[in-house]
Image: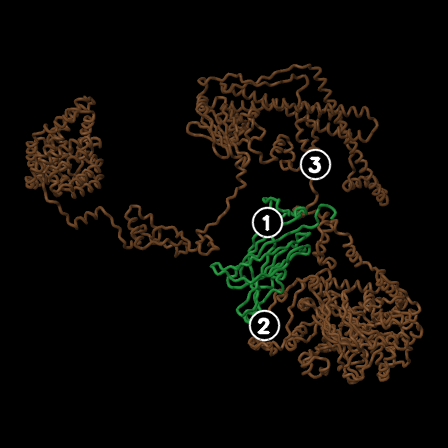
Amino acid sequence: MASTENLREKIKSKRKALQASLGGSRQVDDNRASVAVEIENGARNENARKVEEIQNEDEQVENLKRTMKAQRQRRKKMLIDDIDDVHSEESIQEVNIITHQQRTLPPLPVPTPRTSFAEYSMREKMREKLKAARSKAQSAIQQEEASAPPQHLTPFKDQTSVIQFDTEVDEEDMKTAGVDELPHPSSKVRFHEIANKIKQKSKDGFPSAEEAYNFFTFNFDPEPEEAEEKSKKQKRVGAPKKIDHEEESEGDWDEEESTIRTEAEEEEEGEEEDQPLVKDNMDNEDDYLFIIDQTARDFLVIRAPDYESYYSRQQKDKKVLFTPSILTVATSEKIPEDMQPRFLEDEGIYVGERPKVSKSNQNILEHRLLKNKEGKKWFGSDGRIIALPNPIKQTYTRPPIFSLHEKVDPAIETFYKKAEKSIDDNRYIAGSMELQGRFQLDIDISGIVFTHHPMFSREHVLAAKLVQLYDQYLCRQQHNLAGLYSDKLCALRNAVKSITDYHHVHISVTQRRLVEYKSEIRTTRRMCHMEQEKDWTLLKNLVKVWKDVKSLREFQKFTNTPVKLCLRRQQINRKADEINYEREIQTEVAELLEDYQEEYENKLAEYKKKYEEWKAWRKAKKAKKKKKKSSDEQETDDTEESSMFEEFPKPDPPEQVDVSLVEQQVRTTAARIRRKPGEPVLTPELSMTATVTPTNQCPRGEQLRRQDVQRSTLYAKIIFNNKEVSRTSSQTLSADFRIHFGQIFNVQIINWPESIKIQIFETMGMSSTKTEVFIPIPETTVLTGSALIDEIEFSNAHRITFDHEGVGSGVPFSFEADGSNQMILLTSGKLACSVSWAVREDGVPLIPPVLHENVGVQRSLKHVDAILSIGTSGLTDMKKLARWAAESRLDPNDPSNACLMQLIMSATSGEALDHDYFRLEQLQEEFNFVSDEVFNKSKRFRLLQLRNEEVAEFHNFKQVPILDREISEKIFQEYEKKCHEKDTVDITSHLDPHRALVARFLQKVRDSVKNRFLLAKHHYILSDMVVEEAVPSISSGDSRMLGISLFKLAEPRRPLRPRRKERKKVTAQNLSDGDIKLLVNIIRAYDVPIRKSIGGKPALTSRSARSINETFSTSQIPQSPTQSHEWFTNQTSVRPFVEVSFQRTVRQTSTAEGQNPNWNEELEIPFRAPNGDYSTASLQSVSDDVFINVFDEVVYDVLEDDRERGSDVHTRVERHWLGAVQVPFSTIYSQSRIDGTFRINTPPVLLGYSKERNLSSERGWEAVRSLSEGSYLSLFITVEPHLVPGEAVNEKMIEMLRKLETQEDEKLLQKAEKFQKEVKQKFPNRRCVTLVTDLTGKLVFITRFIKALSPPQELLDAFPQDYEATTELVARYVSLMPFLPDSISFAGICDLWCTSDQFLNLLAGDEEEHAVLLCNYFLAMGKKAWLVIGTAIPEGPTAYVLTYEQNQYVIWNSTTGQYYGQFDAFCPLQSVSCLVSADNVWFNVQKYETVMRVHFDTSKPNLWKPFFSRNFPFPGLSSVQPEELVYRRTDKAAAVELQDKIEKILKEKIMEWRPRHPTRWNRYCTATLRQFLPKLEFSRGGEVGDDHSAELQNQLGDYRISGFPINMSFSELSPIIEAVHSTGVHNTMIPQVEFALAVYVHPYPNNVLSVWIYVASLVRSR
Amino acid sequence: MLSGKPSVFLLMVNGQIESADFPEFDELYCKYSYVYGHDWAPTTGLEEGISQITSKNRDSNQCFVWNFPMEITFKSTNPFGWPQIVISVYGADLFGNDVVRGYGGVHVPTTPGRHKRTIPMFVPESSSKLQKFTSWLTGRRPEFTDPKVVAQGEGREVTRVLSQGYVTISFNIVTKDLKKLGYDSIPANQTSDNTGF
């Protein structure tokens, strides 16, 4: 038994081994177990078997071991005899196999566990090799197995007990038991080693046969051993307690192993049956001596399996396992002791929301944390786990994606975006498309020279300085600026001299040049001095530094640098030098003196001037003084003067410059900046010839420094576009701080170089410093081969200090002993390198295309110091540059300035001039497709522009020619003329100057109004765009009710009851020429004048019965013989036909007979719109009239010979004009149809015709009716297709106007609107007019227009007695005012109302103006008069005047001056809707509106709805009319002049109309007619005709006259011409016809002219 | 004409109103007309036309096929006011009234070659519900005062319209002298040899 100490040690070691092989052993177990499954026997058996086996095995092993012990020892000594070893191992193997054999002997020989056992640590190879042998063995064993199983059970049990016992007994075993399987693997390992070796051996080719032989033959004595073992075990039985004890003590001893141990124990407990045994075995391994004598049986212990109670297991578990509780941990546990939990949130500190964790999980976590030692640090002061606020936000931080396709999840919706090439790509990748190729940069890094290095010694610093100064010196020497300047100075002086010598005459040019030269001399001299001084100081510095170096070397007693400065002395001719010097001094002095003199003179002049001033001032002062006092002059003078001095200082006379002083100055400067005369010229020469003291002779500090220098190495990295491309080899820093790399790097690039950077890394020991140097990208012209090595300076602000001689970097140090004059040097140096573009073999440079064109320019300028003077920005400003060049007097011939001069030249001469103006839309020009000039010149563009502006002349111009030359100038002439006329009055073109003015004024009004309504015109309302059935109103009219209209749908169709169908309305846009036709239906005529003839007796009889106020002559017209002819040929009194002419198109009806003819014919006349524009506005402005003329067709028998009458018919048809009806197209257009009976305008005198009175007329006899005696024509006129009148526009206008300004009260406006709406609802067809537009476009209440205004006195005086006649005259006067419909003057705009004075001024107006004027006159005349708003034919909506006279209402047509009784059937007024007086408006609310059925009693509210009633009384609206109308007397001379003019023009026209016939004028007749016309005027077209015709017949007896006078108001000439033309007088084709034409113009006040034209054709009768 | 340089250019349009798609209606016919500017004038061909009544195809896609040819030549001096074709489609409603089913218009293509256009068609809406009902009842639906208003922008703001369907038209365009007069309507990638007659 070993001592406890030993034991412990053993245990320890074993345990270690165990730990290492723990896994392995387990595996073994596993293997074993798996194998065991195969075996039919139970686990126990197996265990028992195992034990047996092991025992056997062990025995054998021990035997073996014994034999091998020696070998092992030998091995330890590293003296292994190979062969021996092999042998020994073989033997082991054999033993191993023997055990197998052995096992065959006991009843349970299981080969598999064994093999596995062996196999466990064996290599695979071995296993394979062994397989063969094993299988053999197995087969053998199995054979034996089969024979021996029954023997086995009893010993099994025994064995276990024994084992138990054994373990208890064997102390050592026990200790191993603690270790458990420890020995197991170790033994195994050993085994395996051996086995391995054997394996190898066998592999090496040892005969397996032999092995096999040994295997089977070798072992035959295990039995005794087993017995021995048994006995031994039995011996040990006595000491089980001790072991327990030991175990406990072990636990105490090995605390560190405790965990392992417990584990081991657990395992032990789990596998108690075999484990201790195994241990045992293992122990035996070591203490083989002990076991030697034991037999295998001794170790076989069989024991019942241990059962551990659940409780105990739990207890054990508790020790090992920790199960965190889910119960809440008390807060006190979580926070440090004696602290209260602190809740930050309660204290008002914001605490974020914690992430959500379930309570139980949190508790578990807390428990776990608390279990740890430092667990508390996880808890905050509030006793909760420290947690960050919940990072999950409640709201979306990303905006939601709304998708067009709702079904697609917005997150996964894909958008197709076309790949596009970034522009930037081109920037980086040079040669984008065209130049595919690689480019190459050659970067040559030749070396680095440090100008300062941290490891510089002081001497180095000085030496570097010296070198630098020397370099500077050399550079200066090379430039030799001082020399240059002095040469220049010389040259300038010479020039001055030559000028002064040869040009004594002071020509201004030379004078100026002289001044220039002088100033230049001054500057040059200054420059020269400066340069000289610089040179001199440089030289002095050089010498000083060298001296410093020398002194330093002496001081430190060693030399560190090889620098050596030699000063070469150049002896010169002292005398000559002195003379030269002196001369220079003298010239300079002279020049200076000259300058000073000049200055002096200037000053003197100034002084003099001042002095004069001062003198004058003093004089004045003195004079004052003298007056004051005479005594004590001196004193006062002095005081005065002194006082004066303050007030007006006496100017100091300028000092004359002292020559000597100047010279002195010059000399001192010269001495300062130049070498003294006679002194030798010193030329420094720097050489590197000084010997450097060897290191070993230097002091320690220096030695260290030098070592450091040697240790430090440098290398450079090349960074291209911020990417490292290459690096140089590492070089050691040489003693002179120069590094030579001498490497060229070829950088192949595809990107445009952005930057090239070289990083210099210096490593010294561990530390390394980095310095960056940027290298400019070479220009494209820099190619390899031509590139020069550049020295690029760099520096590094890195701070480095050393404890040796090195001065460091960025550290202050001083050369002085006292530490003064400190300086700080930074690491700096020069990198010698060159970057260039490589050239290919074929000579093509590998350069990417140049991107910035101006790079070159700027580069070339870089070297010029222009940058310094004007800054880099100035370079782009050429002006500035040029100015600078001029100022600095750049020498244009200097080659170094050449490129700059060229640039300036090109800049100043070229177009790069700056503009002096600023433009807002600088890009506008680019968008102009032609220049303004071209635009204005082009006729086409002008035409297009005018058309677009809707200028009337060009409004609908079609097909503007594409070429300018196709546009004739004439097009614009008219327009230009018109534009021109707007300002100048062209009297000549008009017959009457006043009319011209009026026309112009009208035009202006028209323009202004047009502009005002232009907006509204383009303002559409729904009805303009969409045709829609109106909502059938339920309240109004019965037939319009929805229900009834529905019934109508179901109504049976009644084809026999035709109903009027509404024609489809056509809007004007889609019409073209020929589409529109005017349909004129001539139905019948009444009371057509009949021919006067002998046979016309009834006419005479009727005539006697005529009314009283008709004066009729009873004289008979003598009948001419021709009339008898007539009578014979024409049985009827008259054969009238109707001719309709419109736009010079003439249609005529057939001829009817009788004075009441009936035609019933439809005439179709095509309509052409002006310019082919069929828009509403255009159609409205059509001013053409439809002339409906009634002619009498007279057939003359022209057969001369009566004898032929029987056989021949030879007649001539003549037509005699009887009268006309004139209907303006605008009326037709706005009315869409005109249906009614019109009075035919018959001339007052119709030669050869008389009115036949029809006594039996059904119309009955009425006095009033007789006043309006005349012929009538029934007509129906319409336009086909139905055009939509532009009335909507007018309505809109009113709407618009309402929004525009008005002077009316808002209340009134509202009331008006309400009123209108009300009545409109009831009587939609009746016009209600309350608010009208005046000429300025404002809304005016209609009553304001009505005011009593007196007519011209002249008219009132005409018939002082006859009231009725006066009335008629006034009406006539009004009717003579020219009529101009608003729709024409304000085309497409609206109805404008003029006040009466405006009307009189304009002398043009439509019905409203006439009616208002007439009404006003009547009111002034004391009549009861109203304005009647209604509809009439043919005018349509119109205004008439109603008067109440002699108990009856008379209706006056103001435009014709005619009047009708209320019950006159032929009254053109068809309906009455409104009555307007000066203070009220009444609306007709009667059932009927026709004049005859209307009661005109406005006092009855059920008949007339008043606007102003008791509810809304008349507010007393003031009139817009003037107080009084002022009339101008018309110039009679002008009237006569006009008369002649008209006559002349008409005669010309008639001749013109008869191009193929001669037109003869009968002067006699004309004269007669002329006399007659004034009479007609006097009688206002009254009944003078018969007298007159009689007279005429008397005078012109031989002639057959047909003719008539036409009366009209004068506005313009064209209507007169038109009227004459329409009569067709000129159409007479009778040969030898003569014409007579007389014109009479009767002037009325205010330029109202009545024009009478008498046209007659005369045919001589024989 | 003085020289070889033309003073007008010609635009020849031929093609056909091929088909229409009006899902709700049947038995439709269409009218077409052109709207063009002041500088345009038709030289030959029909300016207006009215097609036959066609019934809906009985298969699934139910389109109307008119295949109504049209041919017209314009001359002009100015591309401003380039012709537009205006189509209006009519058909009988429930009570047999002829009502409009759609208006639509499109510019005649400016480039020579074959073009196909699909025109959305619309009709003006009634201005109130009641009117809508009565118009439905009486068969007098709101109509444009002139179908040509669809070719102009002025005044459209006062109307409310309802989409009805589509009409497909194919055009074959030939131009003459357009380029000679300085108007290059052909895109750069297209060869210009098909411009002449």
Colouring of the image: by chain
Tell me which residue sits at (73%, 26%) in the image: A662
**Side of A1150 where A1635 appears, left or right:** right
- Distance in Å between CA atoms under marks 1 and 3: 49 Å
Chain corresponding to brown in the figure? A
- Distance in Å between CA atoms under marks 1 and 2: 49 Å
Q: Quadrant of residue A848?
A: top right
For the residues carrying marks 1 and 3, which lies nearer the camera in this image?
Answer: 1
**Side of A1232 where A448 appears, left or right:** left
Three-letter code for the amino acid on which mark 2 is drawn = Val
Q: Is residue A583 above or below residue A964?
A: above
Question: Which residue has dot 1 on it?
Answer: B113
For the residues carrying marks 2 and 3, which lies nearer the camera in this image?
Answer: 2
Q: Is residue A1155 above or below residue A384?
A: below
Mark 2–mark 3 CB contact (< 8 Å): no
Question: Which residue has dot 3 on it?
Answer: A910
> Is residue A1527 at all visible to an observer of this figure?
no
- The x, y position of residue B97, in whole percent, is 56, 69
- Distance in Å between CA atoms under marks 2 and 3: 78 Å
For the residues carrying marks 1 and 2, which lies nearer the camera in this image?
Answer: 1
Residue A1031, label in figure: 2
Q: Secondary structure at mark 1?
A: strand
Q: Is residue A1077 above or below residue A91?
A: below
Three-letter code for the amino acid on which mark 3 is drawn = Gly
- The x, y position of residue A1144, in whole percent, is 78, 64
Mark 1–mark 2 CB contact (< 8 Å): no
Three-letter code for the amino acid on which mark 1 is drawn = Gly
- Image quarter hosting the C terminus of chain A: bottom right
- Check the residue under mark 1 and report the chain it is in: B
